């Protein structure tokens, strides 16, 4: 590709993105295709000769787009709603163009040091203690996995303790590592019951959650910290979703006790306007991470290794992308005030939806709403709720997901997209009511 | 950011990239900064209010760029040289704009199915058997880690066997998983000695390498496969670097026996024009991966789960980026012929450099050159070689790395960048000769 060709293809790609972001709200949120349908439209072999990039862009529209579930859609309300904001999109372009690989400090000083800086900025924005060591992993699954390995290294113990509502990544980590997993029951508001923690003398780590996956419950972190301190267990806090809300002081109650944690994960790629992957992991015990992960083979020994930070020594990966660039772009282009506005808007919209459910006959709320996720259902049996979810998702107008609470099938509406307005939330509610009436 | 603002910032970002790729060859390859220097130039706190994206772009130039080691530089010859090609850069932009998260098939049918398609295309291009299951992990460290977990699941055994020249990611995996690691000695050409494999009755997996990190040695995969078949051990082939060369039939000798492997990793982000991260992992035993990794919690159960492929069931990660898009763009815009041209050019340039070393007095070659990496040194002591490496890297003209072979310090020149010409390689050699004369 000549440089001029790149410039013109690049401008076309930017225009494609601008148009996409402009029209995504008119596309079906959930891809309306059946398994295998996209695959069947693609050729069986790679081309023999080069094709123009314009053909790739055309096929993205014609072949792939019908198979895309639009996470950027303002009526994407499933799991945790996210957004890839414009500055972050452009920063990913720059990061791909630089293509630095931070296996060591010297192979990418800028990305390594910017990562330390933006993690310090974020700690400050979220009210975490100053001076903690921070770095970026791909997803919260990896961050939690790394923390569990550091905890095992630090304690020499083999048991992981979490609640029934803890994210499945902890089950997966226990399985991968061959560690024992013990699940503590939850109270009526789905918080870990500290009176049921049991014997912790073999516990390597307790995973506490601030904003659980199903209902965004907040475990009593302070009480769990006390139990960890008494037993010598590591405290890992999973705030993958709700951590972002801590940029607003009015939600900081949920971080009470987090300053006593050994490690904390917050995903910038959930509610912090940054595309996947950007999971932020802080620890006050960096030496334990280093002991668990540092392994510098001869070919990576350099004269500057003594003074310089190499973040590959703090987690499973060796090759590391320039992920701090997109978070830096988000923090610069939104500022503290812009991030607060985004979080508050999501919470207010969720509050409004919650109000409509509360006032409607035949509907019930199923858990306290702390942030931007509402758990609700049609009163009565599970069957109609299941059918309702399928119908509204099949419409393409909205995409919502579900959870199971106390053995009942519960609908979940999660707000977090940058472009969601009250009209979008209203449209979701009207659709739910209309489809429920036709069940 | 308004849509018009995005369009104009985006065009500016594209122009920045075009200019960067045009001038990268004039910048110092290895960042000429000391540890902490970049950090000290950045503010202590995130801004309170939004700043324009133009300021981010300005600070990228003024503050960060001096701290960037330029992996895109045509005289980057360290470790394994890579390139992020133009179509792949634009595809990363598109992928960040779509921001799909393939936790399940339905959350991103297009990325899931395109991933299956491009892995099948690649298997075909590299001469791997048809019908193998392929998916993308972030790095070869993760691919190998996942394969080892699948092997442990399949065999119920706890020992990993590899050679002294195997990549350090296997040491790291063994440490993370608490598995035993046994290293087999190598022969005079740094290949695993199959006569020294020893007792394999406890071996979960043997990791064979096609293109080792230090000298790109090719382990005798066929003989190792025979040993695996006899002992019930899993065979994992690490072809992270050299796998890409298999697109040319003349290098396929190195893949002899790979068709008998249980799993194989090839990094598209090494020699295949794709930016980090894009590690391709194939297996002929997908059910063993699924048994090791599949864990579908209630909130992720969907009606289409039965028929649909969810790639999060085949590896450690739950959230998955749309990484197939960039590989698709590369395969479309280069075609088989373009990829072959790129590989052959790298090998030819390495051959030429090897010839200059062979003819020069006072220099020696240290290992057979199979692909695009040359291992060489000044005859005599290690000291001058160490000083030579530091001097040429400090010049900013080239960046090379080292390895240790038979306890001797050896210099390594790796070719793989898309824009490297014979002039660049010649300039590296001239600089080495000039600096050596001044030691």
Image (cartoon, coloured by chain):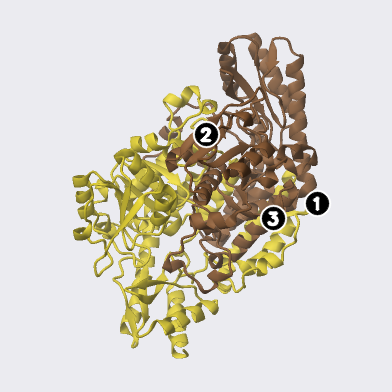
Chain colours: A yellow, B brown
Residue A351 point in image, percent of width and height: 33, 72
* Position of residue A418 measured from the top left corner of the image (x, y, whole percent): 46, 63
Q: Position of residue B381 (x, y in %)?
A: 59, 10
Q: State the residue at coordinates (42%, 24%).
A: A306
From the viewer's perspective, tell me whether residue A275 is left or right of residue A126: right
Q: Can you tell which of label 2 and label 1 is closer to the viewer?
A: 2
Marks 2 and 1 on same chain: no
B1 up-or-down from B376: above or below: below
A8 or A326, which lies in front? Answer: A326
State the mark number for residue B120.
Answer: 3
| Comparing labels 3 and 1, the label whose residue is closer to the camera | 3
**Residue A300 visible within the image:** yes
Helix, strand or loop at disc 1?
Answer: loop
Marks 2 and 3 in Cβ contact (< 8 Å): no
Residue placed at 77% from the left, 35% from the top?
Answer: B345
Q: Chain of mark 3?
A: B
Chain ID of residue with mark 1: A
Q: Callout 2: residue from which chain?
A: B
Label 3 and label 1: CA atoms lie apart by 15 Å
Closer-to-camera residue (A72/B159): B159
């Amino acid at each position: 590709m000549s440089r001029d060709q790149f410039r013109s293809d690049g401008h076309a790609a930017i225009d494609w993105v601008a148009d996409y972001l402009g029209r995504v709200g008119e596309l079906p949120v959930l891809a309306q295709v059946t398994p295998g349908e996209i695959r069947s439209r693609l050729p069986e072999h790679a081309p023999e000769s080069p094709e123009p990039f314009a053909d790739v862009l055309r096929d993205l529209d014609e072949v792939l787009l019908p198979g895309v579930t639009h996470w950027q859609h303002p009526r994407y309300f499933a799991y945790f709603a996210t957004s890839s904001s414009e500055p972050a999109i452009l920063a990913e372009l720059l990061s791909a163009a630089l293509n630095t690989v931070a296996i060591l400090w010297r192979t990418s000083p800028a990305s390594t040091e910017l990562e330390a800086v933006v993690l310090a900025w974020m700690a400050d924005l979220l009210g975490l203690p100053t001076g903690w060591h921070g770095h970026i992993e791909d997803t919260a699954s990896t961050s939690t996995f790394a923390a569990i390995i550091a905890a095992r290294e630090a304690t020499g113990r083999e048991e992981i303790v979490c609640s029934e509502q803890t994210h499945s990544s902890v089950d997966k980590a226990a399985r991968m590592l061959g560690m024992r997993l013990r699940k503590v029951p939850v109270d009526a508001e789905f918080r870990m019951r500290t009176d049921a923690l049991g014997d912790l003398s073999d516990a390597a780590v307790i995973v506490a959650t601030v904003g659980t996956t199903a209902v965004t419950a907040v475990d009593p972190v302070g009480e769990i910290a006390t139990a960890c301190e008494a037993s010598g267990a590591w405290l890992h806090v999973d705030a993958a979703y709700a951590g972002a809300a801590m940029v607003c002081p009015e939600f900081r109650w949920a971080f009470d006790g987090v300053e006593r944690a050994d490690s904390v994960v917050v995903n910038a790629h959930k509610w912090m306007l940054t595309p996947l992957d950007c999971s932020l992991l802080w620890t006050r015990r960096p030496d334990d991470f280093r002991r668990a992960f540092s392994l510098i083979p001869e070919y990576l020994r350099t004269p500057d290794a003594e003074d310089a930070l190499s973040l590959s020594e703090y987690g499973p990966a060796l090759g590391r992308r320039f992920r701090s660039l997109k978070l830096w772009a988000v923090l610069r282009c939104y500022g503290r005030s812009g991030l607060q506005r985004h979080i508050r808007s999501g919470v207010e919209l969720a509050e409004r939806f919650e109000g409509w459910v509360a006032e409607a006959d035949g509907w019930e709320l199923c858990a306290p709403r702390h942030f931007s996720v509402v758990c609700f259902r049609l009163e009565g049996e599970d069957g109609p709720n299941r059918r309702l979810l399928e119908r509204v998702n099949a419409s393409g107008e909205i995409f919502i997901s579900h959870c199971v609470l106390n053995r009942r099938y519960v609908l979940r509406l999660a707000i977090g997209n940058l472009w969601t307005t009250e009209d979008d939330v209203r449209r979701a509610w009207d659709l739910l009511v209309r489809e429920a009436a036709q069940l």
